[in-house]
Image (tube, coloured by chain):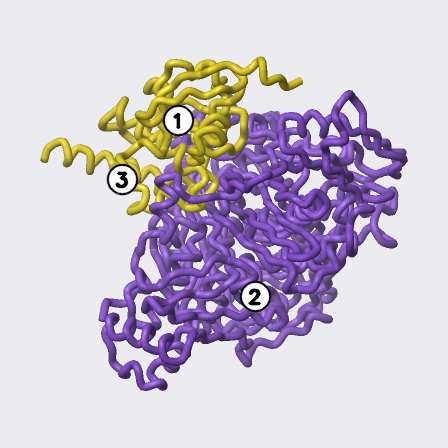
């Protein structure tokens, strides 16, 4: 038997294809008689459609043209509230909303045609900011512009203010952020009334796309097939929006009778698809003289854009993370997601938690200062421990030790010595150094009862060739799904990882194992792989073809013999919620997540007070995420998340002009390059989680949460200036430095 | 408007093979490689020379093929990711990317590997700053670059050992 496969740095399953350029992404797929598809979009933020005009001297007869009238079923992208049309029919609610679809074999001519369709719109007044939406300057959604509101109540906050020694208030903001996967969105569809609809594309969640296409075409479920192909990054940006593109490609294919490919160019992808919700968080915090949190009142608001899409669940995660990994007996959180006339904001790694964590981890530095404690000491006195309760009243059953993580992060980064040294060395220097940190957590899996409702299923198959195949709709989008799920199955079965493979994520052949989101693939889906693999072994042993103790060769022979004798052998496992998880959705009380990743991150920066540039010189990321299945892939996730959050903190600025992204190019929307990211130092503490595969929890989103506040805390340490919003661009820093000098 | 008559013949050598292709003179080299020659390893990430996912060698120089008009490829030698190593073998840089975890979603990987190979050809023993500058034209959104730097260092070591052996 080989050594345990879990914990080994097994090379990425599809690595060879990726480094040789052989991997086939959606734009690499070729189809005979292929048409290219394009989307004609709303030129304004809100209005009534008066007409569509096909102008110019183009051979319009050659084009397939689709409008809302051509939709065979329901004109909506089914998700949560079903309020978003697939194609705008009478009104538009945001710039770039899809109105008309075109297809043609020549993509150059198609682009000319796209520019020659004029959508005539009678403009209506629109709202563009959280404040305008809250003030109900116009009602643009529902009765009050509120997409979702949530209230969390713990203890009695009203009584704490009178007995508090300190009351500290603050307001914090974060901007929109583009996921900026390097592969733009794309889909290919084949559709007709006999065979139904098949789409191939870049996506995270094949069954979301499936769920959207079934009512759009009014087809039975087995007449819709969705296949994920190699996907060049997602980060949440390919969670819900691919349903829209798949719908568009499928409608064009349905009408033309030919395969249709829609590939967004970068500008279209950035302008029309989802981004991270802009946020505003207000804190009012009561603290005792001893530096203990007495009460927290938090008001959290997200700008959701024109339709509900996933805003309710983004708000939910942001709300639950708003009070952080701290014990506070009295907490009130009031949250709202608001409608504005921008393209809908959506899923992006962290899913609301980076926004509320930024606010809290900035605010607690302010609180510590007011109380007269160091930021580290203040947090140490308030860290949540095993047996204590979170803001939703969840009793922590994990053996969490935030103080230990803090201590280790401080040691590795030489935090205390540097605080002292920088304070001395910065005097009179133009370039000032600073160090800062954030302590935080991230819940793995769907919130509350989400996993129970998903009821995900995973299968494991023994093949005639003596191999093991994992049947799951969980997608590989770069994060390592293929490899870690194979490792988990191999480890369970005592096999070499090479004997296990992934079935393609094709809804015709794999069960619905839920979406590839929410740091759930390893912890939730991985656990199902583990139990399905165990069932496979039991079936083989039970059949008498496999001895209880076996070699990999004996296992392979048993698979072959079983299939020859009895036919296909597939075992399935369905999610069962651990009995102690109790969630009250109505009152937002109880076990919000089965488990959390816990972390302390330390950032070291240089701030040039003349050019106002900030450089991240060193970054230490210490976290406890249960057992690490693959150390190379796991640290790769943390490093990538930290880099993405460096962008969130310092560079990535979406410029809005009347609801439209004005800088939808890589030239003017700046993400970190190889010149901007330090070698990120990643450390794991491993405390096995009882309900995770081999003890693993989720980790993909965690690095997005604490990085930005750690960096901004470091800038504050370097310069003494107070920053309450990100991104911190040199322009803003210049203004703040000017004010602080005056 | 498009007009077949305006197409020109472009003769070039791609990955050691001679080709003659009839294309619009201002067609992008990226499209010629992907659509005419079916070499889909070079990717389009931005179409404006920012991301480097379409990087190839044009007469030994690292270029963004989305910015090269087809006419400029006339009589040129082009190498793409498909031609960086003999069939069924791997270049030391490719091997190092696998071992170090330098590729995640993989969409930037072909371009990133072209940039890394080009860097090691120009600067056989790069320091950290050389690596950072050498890869600055290639954006990666997954890795945070740390494991890409490790891959380049690893490849550099392997290539040195190969030379010694």
- Residue A23, picture quadrant: top left
Q: CA distance from mark 2 to mark 3?
A: 37 Å
Chain in purple on the image:
A
Q: Give the quarter of the figure containing the N terminus of chain A.
A: bottom left
Identify which residue is drawn at 54% across, 35% down. A650
The tag on residue A512 is 2
Identify which residue is drawn at 34% across, 19% down. B77
Crowding near the residue tagged with mark 3, few <14, some 14–19, many ≥20 C-alpha atoms within 10 Å: some
Residue B162, compared with residue A622, is above or below; it is above
**Where does label 1 land, which residue?**
B56
Residue A674, compared with residue A437, is above or below; it is above
Chain in yellow on the image:
B
Please indicate whether residue A700 sits to the left or right of residue A20 in the image: right
Q: Nearer the viewer, residue A219 or A588?
A: A219
Q: Give the quarter of the figure containing the C terminus of chain A.
A: top right
Find residue A663 and report its horizontal and vertical position in percent: 64, 29
Find residue A66 and report its horizontal and vertical position in percent: 76, 41
Q: Chain of mark 2?
A: A
Q: CA distance from mark 2 to mark 1?
A: 40 Å
- Residue A227, picture quadrant: bottom right
The tag on residue B90 is 3
Please indicate whether residue B10 sits to the left or right of residue A43 in the image: left
């Amino acid at each position: 038997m080989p050594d345990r496969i879990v914990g080994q740095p097994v090379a990425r399953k599809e690595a060879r294809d990726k480094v040789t350029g052989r991997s086939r992404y959606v734009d690499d797929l070729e189809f005979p008689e292929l048409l290219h598809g394009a989307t004609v979009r709303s030129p304004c933020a809100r209005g009534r459609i008066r007409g569509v005009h096909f102008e110019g001297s183009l051979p319009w007869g050659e084009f397939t043209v689709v409008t809302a009238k051509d939709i065979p079923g329901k004109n909506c992208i089914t998700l949560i509230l079903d309020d978003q049309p697939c194609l705008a029919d009478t009104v538009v609610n945001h710039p770039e909303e899809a109105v008309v679809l075109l297809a043609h074999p020549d993509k150059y001519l198609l682009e000319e045609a796209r520019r020659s369709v004029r959508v005539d719109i009678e403009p209506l007044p629109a709202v563009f900011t959280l404040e305008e939406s809250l003030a109900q300057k116009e009602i643009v959604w529902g009765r009050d512009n509120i997409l979702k509101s949530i209230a969390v109540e713990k203890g009695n906050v009203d009584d704490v203010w009178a007995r508090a020694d300190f009351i500290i208030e603050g307001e914090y903001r974060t901007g929109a952020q583009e996921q900026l996967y390097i592969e733009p969105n794309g889909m290919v569809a084949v559709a007709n009334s006999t065979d139904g609809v098949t789409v191939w594309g870049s996506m995270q969640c094949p069954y979301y796309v499936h769920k959207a296409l079934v009512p759009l075409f009014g087809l039975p479920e087995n007449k819709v097939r969705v296949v994920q192909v190699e996907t060049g990054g997602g980060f949440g940006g390919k969670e819900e929006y691919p349903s829209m593109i798949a719908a568009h490609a499928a409608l064009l294919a349905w009408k033309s009778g030919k395969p249709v490919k829609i590939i967004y160019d970068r500008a279209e992808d950035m302008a029309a698809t989802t981004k991270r919700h802009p946020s505003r968080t207000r804190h009012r915090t009561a603290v005792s003289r001893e530096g203990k949190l007495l009460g927290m009142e938090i008001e959290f608001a997200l700008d959701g854009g024109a339709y509900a899409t996933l805003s309710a669940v983004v708000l939910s995660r942001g709300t639950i993370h708003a009070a952080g990994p701290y014990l506070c007996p009295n907490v009130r959180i009031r949250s709202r997601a608001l409608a504005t006339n921008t393209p809908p904001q959506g899923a992006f790694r962290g899913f609301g938690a980076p926004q509320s964590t930024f606010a809290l981890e900035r605010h607690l530095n302010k609180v510590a200062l007011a109380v007269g404690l160091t930021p580290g000491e203040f947090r140490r006195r308030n860290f949540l421990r095993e047996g204590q309760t979170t803001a939703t009243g969840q009793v922590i059953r994990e053996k969490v030790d935030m103080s230990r993580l803090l201590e280790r992060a401080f040691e590795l980064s030489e935090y205390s010595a540097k605080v002292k040294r920088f304070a001395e060395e910065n005097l009179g220097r133009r370039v000032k150094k600073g160090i800062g940190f954030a302590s935080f957590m991230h819940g793995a899996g769907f919130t509350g009862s989400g996993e129970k409702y998903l009821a995900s299923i995973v299968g494991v198959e023994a093949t005639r060739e003596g191999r093991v195949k994992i049947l799951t709709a969980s997608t590989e989008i770069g994060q390592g799904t293929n490899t870690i799920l194979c490792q988990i199955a191999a480890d369970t079965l005592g096999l070499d990882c090479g004997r296990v493979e992934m079935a393609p994520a094709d809804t015709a052949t794999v069960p619905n194992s839920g979406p590839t989101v929410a740091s759930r693939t390893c912890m939730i889906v991985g656990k199902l792989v583990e139990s399905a693999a165990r069932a496979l072994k039991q079936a083989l042993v039970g059949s008498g073809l496999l001895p209880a103790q076996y070699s990999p060769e004996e296992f392979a022979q048993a698979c072959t013999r079983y299939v020859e004798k009895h036919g296909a052998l597939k075992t399935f496992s369905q999610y069962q919620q651990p009995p102690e998880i109790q969630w009250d959705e109505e009152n937002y009380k109880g076990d919000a997540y089965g488990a959390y990743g816990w972390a302390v991150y330390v950032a070291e920066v240089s701030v040039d007070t003349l050019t106002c540039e900030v450089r991240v010189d060193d970054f230490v990321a210490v976290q406890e995420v249960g057992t690490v299945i693959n150390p190379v892939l796991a640290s790769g996730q943390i490093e990538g998340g930290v880099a993405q959050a460096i962008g969130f903190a310092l560079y990535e600025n979406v410029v809005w002009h009347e609801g439209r992204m004005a800088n939808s190019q890589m030239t003017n929307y700046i993400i970190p390059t190889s010149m901007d990211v330090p070698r990120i130092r990643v450390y794991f503490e491993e405390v096995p989680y009882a309900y995770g595969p081999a003890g693993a929890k989720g980790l993909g989103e965690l690095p997005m949460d604490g990085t930005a506040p750690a960096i901004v805390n470091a800038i504050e340490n370097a310069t003494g200036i107070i920053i309450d919003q990100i991104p911190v661009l040199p322009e803003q820093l210049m203004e703040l430095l000017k004010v602080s000098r005056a | 408007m498009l007009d077949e008559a305006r197409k020109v013949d472009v003769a070039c050598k791609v990955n050691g093979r001679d080709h003659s292709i009839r294309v619009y003179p201002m067609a992008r080299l990226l499209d010629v490689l992907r659509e005419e020659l079916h070499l889909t390893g070079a990717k389009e990430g931005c179409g404006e020379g920012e991301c480097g996912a379409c990087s190839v060698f044009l007469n030994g120089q690292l270029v963004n093929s989305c910015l090269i008009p087809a006419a400029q490829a006339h009589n040129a030698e082009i190498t793409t990711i498909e031609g960086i190593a003999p069939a069924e073998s791997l270049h030391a840089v490719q091997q190092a990317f696998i071992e170090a975890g330098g590729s995640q979603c993989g969409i930037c990987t072909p371009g990133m590997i072209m940039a890394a190979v080009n860097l090691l050809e120009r600067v056989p023993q790069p320091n950290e700053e050389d690596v950072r500058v050498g890869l600055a034209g290639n954006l990666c959104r997954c890795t945070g670059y740390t494991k890409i730097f490790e891959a380049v260092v690893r490849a550099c070591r392997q290539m040195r050992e190969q030379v010694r052996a």
